[in-house]
Image: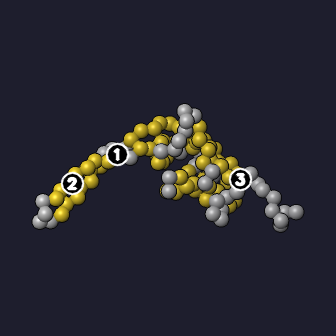
């Protein structure tokens, strides 16, 4: 099973081809596909490649399914005995991505030559 660990929006996600994930908003400029370059780990055909901090030459390609806003959460602040109460709502923006391909370009190292 091929999978990768990618980092976007300050969070890490385990992705496989065909899976969908919701991430923090990714600027797409109207494009339908996105390349994620911060790949921390790649597993292909039983080969595990660990990055330090990222895997050189590894990319995860995804298509944009939708962009939207999550469900509203309420944020309450309260201070006892001072009649201080604040109630705010917050909705986080997201981009839903469908993973299409995980690829890694083998780079030559000093050991290979």
Residue 50 position in % (x across, y down):
65, 63
Give the mark toward the camera: 1 or 3.
1
Residue at 74% across / 51% down in the picture?
105
Residue at 34% across / 45% down in the picture?
91
At numbered mark 1, what does the secondary structure look like: helix, strand or loop? loop
Between discs 2 and 3, the one toward the N terminus: 3
Q: Counting other residues with Cα less than 10 Å from the Cα at mark 3, is it few (<14), some (14-19), or many (20 or more)?
A: few
Give the mark toward the camera: 1 or 2.
2
Q: Measure the C-alpha gap from mark 2 to mark 3.
A: 49 Å
* Mark 3, residue position: 57
Between discs 1 and 2, the one toward the N terminus: 2
Q: Counting other residues with Cα less than 10 Å from the Cα at mark 1, is it few (<14), some (14-19), or many (20 or more)?
A: few
* Mark 2, residue position: 86
Between discs 1 and 3, the one toward the N terminus: 3
At numbered mark 2, what does the secondary structure look like: helix, strand or loop? strand
Along the viewing direction, whichever of 60 and 53 lies nearer the viewer: 53
Query: In the visual, does 86 lie left or right of 41?
Result: left
Along the viewing direction, whichever of 104 and 16 lies nearer the viewer: 104
* Mark 1, residue position: 91
* Residue 38 lies in quadrant: bottom right
* Residue 81 lies in quadrant: bottom left
Quarter of the C terminus within the rendering: bottom right
Give the mark toward the camera: 2 or 3.
2
Q: Counting other residues with Cα less than 10 Å from the Cα at mark 2, is it few (<14), some (14-19), or many (20 or more)?
A: few
C-beta proximity under 8 Å, tags 1 and 3: no
């Amino acid at each position: 099973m091929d999978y990768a660990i990618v980092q976007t929006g300050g969070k890490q996600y385990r992705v496989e081809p065909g899976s969908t994930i919701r991430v923090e908003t990714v600027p797409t400029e109207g494009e339908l596909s996105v390349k994620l370059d911060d790949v921390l780990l790649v597993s292909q055909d039983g080969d595990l490649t660990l990055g330090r901090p990222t895997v050189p030459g590894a990319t995860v390609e995804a298509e944009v399914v939708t962009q939207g806003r999550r469900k509203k959460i309420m944020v309450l602040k309260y201070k006892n005995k001072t009649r201080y109460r604040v109630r705010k709502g917050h909705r986080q923006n997201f981009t839903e991505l469908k993973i299409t391909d995980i690829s890694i370009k083998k780079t030559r190292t000093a050991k290979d030559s």
